[in-house]
Image (cartoon, rainbow, N blue to C red):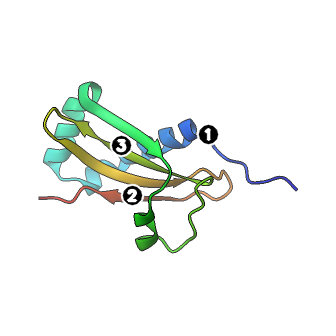
């Protein structure tokens, strides 16, 4: 029996970003959406990596590092980075899952 069918990190990152773009207008305030759209080409960043320990406080499943990816979406300004979303996404093609921690509104 073979193991799970996994998306590559690049594929999972693209999926996470597409989900971010789709849900951002409903989860961020209007000013944040405008700022992101204005500066994303020049200052935007998407970082992927191994999920950190914080996720265990938000999801009730075991997070296997090989099967999940953490994706950060934000803007990198000279004086201060702005993180708009921290995304946990499954790489398992047969077990889709995505959870997003959104930037809190001020």
Residue 83 on image: x %, y %: 26, 47
Q: Distance between the residues labelled 1 and 3?
A: 20 Å
Q: Where is residue 34 in the image (x, y as percent from the top left)?
A: 17, 39
Foreground tag (3 vs 2): 2
User: Label 3 near label 1: C-beta < 8 Å?
Assistant: no
Image position of 81 (left or right of 88): left
Residue at 50% of width from left, 51% of height from top? Answer: 50
Q: Mark 1 points at which residue?
A: 8
**Sequence-first disc among 1 and 3:** 1
Using the rendered view, name the quadrant where residue 79 is placed. top left
Occupied quadrant, residue 62: bottom right
Number of other residues with Cα within 10 Å of mark 1, as a class: few under 14, some 14 to 19, many 20 or more: few
Measured Cα–Cα span from mark 3 to mark 2? 12 Å
Circle 3 residue: 21
Q: Is residue 62 above or below residue 11?
A: below
**Disc number placed over residue 100 in the picture, else none:** 2
Tell me the crowding category of disc 3: few under 14, some 14 to 19, or many 20 or more residues within 10 angstroms, Cα based. Answer: few
Percent position of residue 4, x then y: 74, 53
Marks 1 and 2 sit apart, C-alpha to C-alpha, by: 20 Å
Q: In percent of the image, x 24 and y 55: which residue is there? A: 103
Helix, strand or loop under label 1: loop
């Amino acid at each position: 029996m073979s193991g799970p069918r996994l998306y590559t990190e690049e594929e999972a990152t693209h999926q996470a970003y597409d989900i971010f773009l789709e849900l951002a207008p409903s989860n961020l305030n209007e000013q944040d959406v405008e700022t992101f759209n204005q500066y994303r080409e020049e200052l935007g960043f998407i970082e992927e990596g191994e999920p950190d320990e914080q996720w265990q406080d938000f999801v009730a499943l075991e997070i296997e590092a090989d099967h999940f990816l953490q994706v950060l979406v934000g803007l990198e300004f000279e004086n201060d980075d702005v993180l708009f979303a921290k995304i946990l996404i499954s790489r398992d093609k047969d077990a889709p899952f995505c959870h997003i921690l959104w930037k809190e509104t001020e």
